[in-house]
Amino acid sequence: MADDSISGKWKLDRSENFEEFLEEMGAPWIARKAAAKSSPTQEIVLNGDEIEVKISSMMSNNVMKFTVGTEFETEWSKQKSKAMANWEDGKLVMKENGANGEVVTTRHVEGGELFMIITTPKGVVCKRIFKKCE
């Protein structure tokens, strides 16, 4: 079941294991260091089963548009992969199958913060916690 509280614009507050995640995904050292210092915003728009996620930072801007329960193509670091998102226990769970294996990204709101938890094929768990923009 969809959780409407996930909608809105969010700014990164803190991260755990972000550089480790980027390293496993093949990002070069300099890109990992620059990305770790950036504070991206994430805007999530829900329209029924249609979802749009806009991620903006000083390094890049990405937009993902997808329908819950329907396979879609996504691109990260110039690598395309197939993904599917579903609601599981009030959390938006996206499973992406890329060249390195399956990456699972879960988004949910807890205590007024947006938690984005990314689990890599080798088990690195990256947490990115966002605060809602006023």
Image (spheres, rainbow, N blue to C red):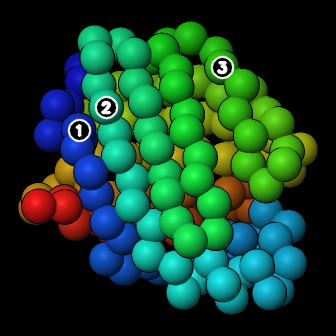
C-alpha distance separating marks 1 and 2: 5 Å
Which marked residue is nearer to the observer: mark 2 or mark 3? 2
Looking at the image, is 43 positioned above or below residue 82?
below
Task: Give, as a three-letter code, the residue at label 1.
Answer: Ser
Circle 1/circle 3 CB separation < 8 Å:
no
Residue 15 picture location, percent across and down: 44, 78
Task: Give, as a three-letter code, the residue at label 2.
Answer: Val
Circle 1/circle 2 CB separation < 8 Å:
yes
Looking at the image, is 45 positioned above or below residue 13?
above
Residue 95 picture location, percent across and down: 60, 35
Question: What kind of element bears circle 3?
Answer: strand
Query: How packed is label 2: few (under 14 Cα within 10 Å), some, or many (20 or more)?
Result: some
Residue sitting nearer the eye, 50 or 106:
50
Residue sitting nearer the eye, 18 or 47:
47
Question: What kind of element bears circle 2?
Answer: strand
Residue at 52% across / 66% down in the picture? 57
Residue 97 seen in this snapshot: no
- Residue at mark 1: 7
- Residue at mark 2: 45
Kindly indicate the quadrant of the structure image that contains residue 14.
bottom left
C-alpha distance separating marks 2 and 3: 17 Å
Residue at 73% across / 49% down in the picture? 76
In the drawing, does residue 112 fall left or right of residue 114? left
Circle 2/circle 3 CB separation < 8 Å:
no
Sequence order check: which comes first, mark 1 or mark 3? Answer: 1
Please give the label number shown on residue 56: none
Sequence order check: which comes first, mark 2 or mark 3? Answer: 2
Task: Give, as a three-letter code, the residue at label 3.
Answer: Phe
- Residue at mark 3: 72
